[in-house]
Amino acid sequence: MSTYMPKAADIERKWYILDAKGQSLGRVAAQAATLLRGKHKPTFAPHADCGDHVIIINCAEAVLTGKKLEQKSYRWHTGWIGGLKEIKYGELMKKNPQKAMTIAVNGMLPNNTLGRKALTRLRVYAGAEHDQQAQKPEPYEI
């Protein structure tokens, strides 16, 4: 029996909705990363881009456990001298909860072209409304 190799033309992409309301930010991000990679499919191959589209709603109501809101921070560098920036997750969740979820999902994807391509199939919304009703997304239970 030969090993199955998925072709780009054979891949069928579905649309899933993940509701982050009352869920841990990391658990939602891990499930989204699994769906984006396609690891839930029996035809998964690590070298092929066979993932699905994911819509995450209610990111503003995702939960961070423990003291992460006060202690955890996101750091980035602008590229300029002295350009190290930092923001606490409590402030980030109030200001831009979509970015917090996107950062978490991006950290769980591979750091290569497959991961960057998978991140383009992620849509994140702070509230319950989204713009992808025409794609008929299915709710996915975590």
Image: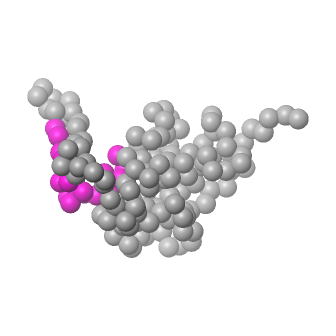
Q: Position of residue 29 (x, y in %)?
A: 43, 51
x, y percent for residue 81 = 12, 26
Q: Is residue 50 above or below residue 22?
A: above
Instruction: Give 82 or 60, whichever is nearer the viewer.
Output: 60
Q: Residue at x 63, y 34 (%)?
A: 47
**Front-most of residues 70 and 139:** 70
Query: On the rendered structure, is 55 left or right of 89?
Result: right
Which residue occupies the foreground of this view, 35 or 64? 64
Q: Is residue 68 left or right of residue 6?
A: left
Say which quarter of the image contains residue 3.
top right
Compared to residue 45, the image places residue 134 above or below, namely below
What is the magenta segment's predominant secondary structure? helix
Q: Is residue 141 magenta?
A: no
Q: How is the image coloured?
A: one colour
Q: Is residue 98 above or below residue 71?
A: below
Q: Is residue 76 visible?
A: yes
Residue that sits furthest to the left in the current view: 82
x%, y% of residue 89?
Answer: 23, 50
- Outermost residue on the front side: it is 66
The answer to whether 29 appears left or right of 94 in the picture is right
Residue 93 location, x and y as percent? 24, 57
Q: Is residue 127 above or below residue 39?
A: below
The residue positioned 62% from the left and 36% from the top of the image is 46
Residue drawn where x is 41% and y is 43% of the image? 106
Quadrant of the rendered structure where residue 75 is?
A: top left
Magenta segment boundaries in residue numbering: 85-103
- For the point 62% across and 56% down, which residue is it? 13
Q: Quadrant of the N terminus?
A: top right
